[in-house]
Amino acid sequence: MQKQANSPIKIGLIAYALDRATGGIGRYTSELHKALSQIGADPILLWAGRASNGRQAVSLPGAGLLPGLLTLGQFEIAWLARQKKLDLVHDPTGVFPLLLTGARRVVTIHDVFPYISPNTSTLAEQLIYRGWLPVALRRAEAVITVSQHSKADIQRYLHLKADKVTVIPEAASDCYRPLPESQVEPVLQRHGIQRPYILYVGSIEPRKNLLRLLQAYARLREASPQWRLVIVGARNVWLSNPIILAIDKMDLKPWVQFTGYIPESDLPALYNGADLFAFPSLYEGFGLPVLEAMRCGAPVVTSNLSSLPEVAGDAAILVDPYDVEAIASAMRLALTQPGLAQDLQRRGLEWSKGFTWERTARQTLAVYQKVLSA
């Protein structure tokens, strides 16, 4: 049944784990919801758990944790879709099968890393991607992904036709921008960060390639010892972790700082204060920290693999992430050649303007409209 062209679309957007320290998918959900609302789409958040105040949201009270969302939550979503007369439900996480809802279904899949590197994926990730995800895709009318590289992986591993998958890039939030020194230094002091420093933002899972980044940093220090390395966002950094053991072995402990989770409101200041942002990841569905760093004017060294060349364009130094010497050499160049650093800053600021959440929202709305007109 086709939706009339002039009729308002009633959209349900599933919100999972937004009441906790949000990662990339949580930020995608929040920014997409805000941007869709700003262009008049006004989606209803189907909030996994008890909806927090101040949001246009309805609760899925038995679905605050993933097992509940995959079971009881499916009944709740179906019931709310009927009660609210939703035309379409969008799962921005790509893991909820939406088996029971009568509304049209759109799914965002950010990457399929558990297929690419099963040995470094958790059992839960394997179950979701090999069990739930194929079921979800059979029931979805459209799939959104965030890069051409992810689309190619989805087609390869999940055997979807190209016309079912639409690439819609992410964007950095408007809070990421050049800041005056008066807004940067107090944040650095609050988190005990001393300049000058190289910045990394992300987890410490193997695909992030932190071990090689540390090895490259150790080589950099042999020639240019003044820079510290600040690692932001990493959780569960136990003393037995291979990263910690490598830091001890290379005698880097006095110069490597783990900040743990930092609220997004403080991240722009950390990007602004950095002399360099280093992100030599082995695999990313998108790689949002690269855009965030660019929007704040930080020179970027990143990987030449997966989606990162799409995200970075010609505004970063791209390196082979398996080559420690290449990573070290690129960092050394960006840190010791002011002309190169300024050129990277200029190009990064200009390139990142092409990625906006308004554009993402309008392209997403076009997918909704296409699904409902079919």
Image (cartoon, rainbow, N blue to C red):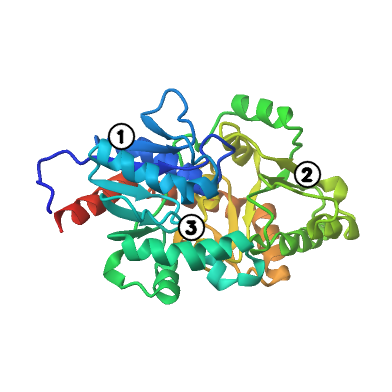
The alpha-carbon separation of the residues under discs 2 and 3 comes to: 26 Å
The alpha-carbon separation of the residues under discs 1 and 2 comes to: 39 Å
Specify whether 110 is left or right of 238: left
Instruction: For label 3, count other residues whose C-alpha is less than 10 Å away and answer few (under 14), some (14-19) or many (20+).
Output: many
Specify whether 215 is left or right of 273: right
* Front-most of residues 374 and 250: 374
- The three-letter amino acid code for the residue at tag 3 is Phe
- The label on residue 257 is 2
Residue at 54% x, 66% y: name it: 113
Residue 145: image location, x then y, percent: 39, 59
Specify whether 259 is left or right of 128: right
Instruction: For label 1, count other residues whose C-alpha is less than 10 Å away and answer few (under 14), some (14-19) or many (20+).
Output: some
- The label on residue 240 is none
Residue 8: image location, x then y, percent: 17, 38
Residue occupied by mark 3: 286
Residue at 72% x, 27% y: name it: 190
Residue at 35% x, 72% y: name it: 160
Instruction: For label 2, count other residues whose C-alpha is less than 10 Å away and answer few (under 14), some (14-19) or many (20+).
Output: some
Quarter of the image where one finds residue 56: top left
Residue at 72% x, 60% y: name it: 213
- The label on residue 37 is 1
The answer to whether the residues at label 2 and label 3 have Cβ atoms under 8 Å apart is no
Frontmost of labels 3 and 1 is 1
Element type at mark 2: strand
The alpha-carbon separation of the residues under discs 3 and 1 comes to: 23 Å
Query: Disc 1 or 2, which lies upstream in sequence?
Result: 1
The N terminus lies in which quarter of the figure?
bottom left
- The three-letter amino acid code for the residue at tag 2 is Gln
The answer to whether the residues at label 1 and label 2 have Cβ atoms under 8 Å apart is no
